[in-house]
Image: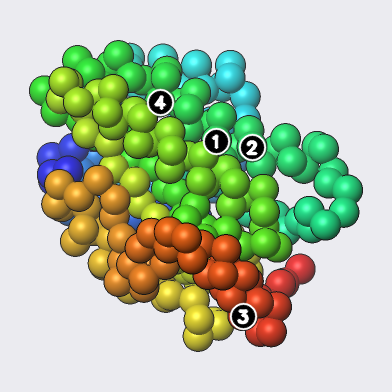
Amino acid sequence: MKLTGNTIFVTGGTSGIGRGLAEALHRLGNKIIISGRRRALLNEIIAVNPGMAAIELDINDPASIKRAAETIIRDFPETNVLFNNAGIMPFDDVAGPIDDATAQGVITTNLLGPIRMSSALIEHLKAQPEATILYTSSVLAFVPLATNAIYSATKAALHSYALSQRFQLRGTGVRVQEIAPPWVDTDLIYKSGDPRAMPLEDFIVQTIAALGTDAPEILVEAVKPLRDNPGASEHALVHAFNQGIVDHPIPVGS
């Protein structure tokens, strides 16, 4: 995608990767509209980023998505980039019973949310001279983390959805790009300074550089070895990846 002159709507733009990329793209001269459920937090962020705008959005609520899309089309008709970034990552243990409400919450936020948001804006984006839909998936779409099985499954599904949508939009001016982060040191799990986690600032720099290309997948260097298709060795790779986490657990804060 082009890196300047866009009007970009960001879901999940109040913290972590979403906020970091929103602010970086804002500094590059794009019009940024962030969204989230908490108006007070939205106001805090736009106060320190003059020119940025905000819309209240509950990505779990189809009616809220519809209202947000109507507001974007009415108040920001030049919007040409949808950045689907909202997501949650609770731990789970699929070796035992799963709490159904938690499972539905993860699936609704991480998968149905971006599907619904894209659907609500797709005709508007197709009417733009050029447009982009961005999805934040995860390296866990390719190599699942067993302690976050439902999260990993939603990101694998989102990757599949992006592949299909990219093909279906091939004859239009809408590009589909997927950002697949590694473990980044944010509050998605617990901001701990763990040396295995990529510093957010480094992730933002590498991601912005890659976004300025035509690459369908935006991959920082740390992701590329795990992104390579493991083929018939997939089971051994996933087992070894997760055993490494078991041997050196991810810190979990309260």
Q: Distance between the residues labelled 2 and 4?
A: 16 Å
**Pointers 4 and 1 in contact (CB under 8 A)?**
no
Name the residue at 20% across, 26% down: 170
Q: Can you say which quadrant of the picture contains the C terminus?
A: bottom right
| CB under 8 Å between discs 4 and 3 | no
**N-term mark: 2 or 4:** 2
Relative placement, left or right, of 13 versus 25 is: right
Mark 3 vs 1, N-terminal side = 1
Q: How far apart are marks 1 and 2 (CA)?
A: 5 Å
| Cα–Cα gap, marks 3 and 1 | 28 Å
The three-letter code of the residue at mark 4 reads Ser
Query: Is the C-beta separation of discs 2 and 4 under 8 Å?
Result: no
User: In this rendering, is residue 163 above or below 202?
Assistant: above
In front: label 4 or label 3: 3
Q: According to the image, label 1 marks what residue? A: 111
Question: Closer to us: mark 2 or mark 4?
Answer: 2
Of the pair 86 and 156, the residue shown nearer to us: 156
Q: How far apart are marks 4 and 1 (CA)?
A: 11 Å
Q: Mark 2 points at which residue?
A: 107
Of callouts 4 and 3, the N-terminal one: 4
Q: Residues within 10 Å of mark 3 (few under 14, many from 20)?
A: few
Q: Residue 36: image x %, image y %?
A: 53, 39
What secondary structure is found at the residue carrying circle 2?
Answer: helix
Q: Give amino acid for label 1.
A: Leu
Q: Which residue is drawn at 51% across and 46% down?
A: 156
Label 4 sits on a secondary structure element that is helix
Q: Is residue 17 visible?
A: no
Residue 85 picture quarter: top left
- Residue position for label 3: 244
Give me the residue at 62% from left, 70% from top.
239
- Badges 2 and 3: C-beta atoms under 8 Å apart? no
> Which residue is under mark 4?
118
